[in-house]
Image (spheres, rainbow, N blue to C red):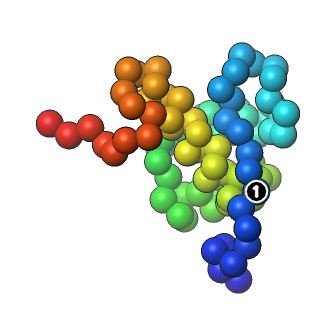
Amino acid sequence: MSSSSRSPTLITARLSPPGQMSRISDDQERILEYNFGHLTKTPDGITLEIIAAESGLSVEETAKWFQNRYALWRQKEGLPPNSGRVTD
């Protein structure tokens, strides 16, 4: 079954202080943060599937989390939250 045939489930990355996350458990958050910090900030489809399986979230939830977390990271780095990659 194609993931594009399902409607995505919205989930919010931690944009507020710790403890205010409503739909992701602490264990899931640790898995997502570890992968974001140590593996990739912009995972491809296969990597998203692996991280989703590891965390117990859907691929759509995982993709949305990474999208939001990447925007937050860019903002903290002083970059626009939703523009393309920085090039030399």
25 relative position to 4: left or right: right
Residue 85 in percent (x, y) is at 31, 43
Name the residue type under label 1: Thr
Residue 68 in percent (x, y) is at 59, 39
Q: Is the C terminus in the top left, top right, bottom left or bottom right quadrant?
A: top left
Mark 1: give few (<14), some (14-19) or many (20+) Cα within 10 Å: few
- For disc 1, the marked residue is 9
Residue 35 occupies quadrant: top right
Residue 29 in percent (x, y) is at 72, 34
Residue 53 in percent (x, y) is at 72, 58
Residue at image x 59%, y 57%?
48
Task: Tell me the element at label 1.
Answer: loop
Answer yes or no: is residue 42 visible: yes
Residue in the foreground of this view, choosing between 55 and 72: 72
Work out whether 78 lies above or below 87. Answer: above
Residue 11 occupies quadrant: top right
Residue in the foreground of this view, choosing between 68 and 45: 68
Work out whether 16 lies above or below 57. Answer: above
Work out whether 26 lies above or below 57. Answer: above
Q: Residue furthest top?
A: 17
Work out whether 86 lies above or below 53. Answer: above
> How many badges with numbers are in the image?
1
85 relative position to 37: left or right: left
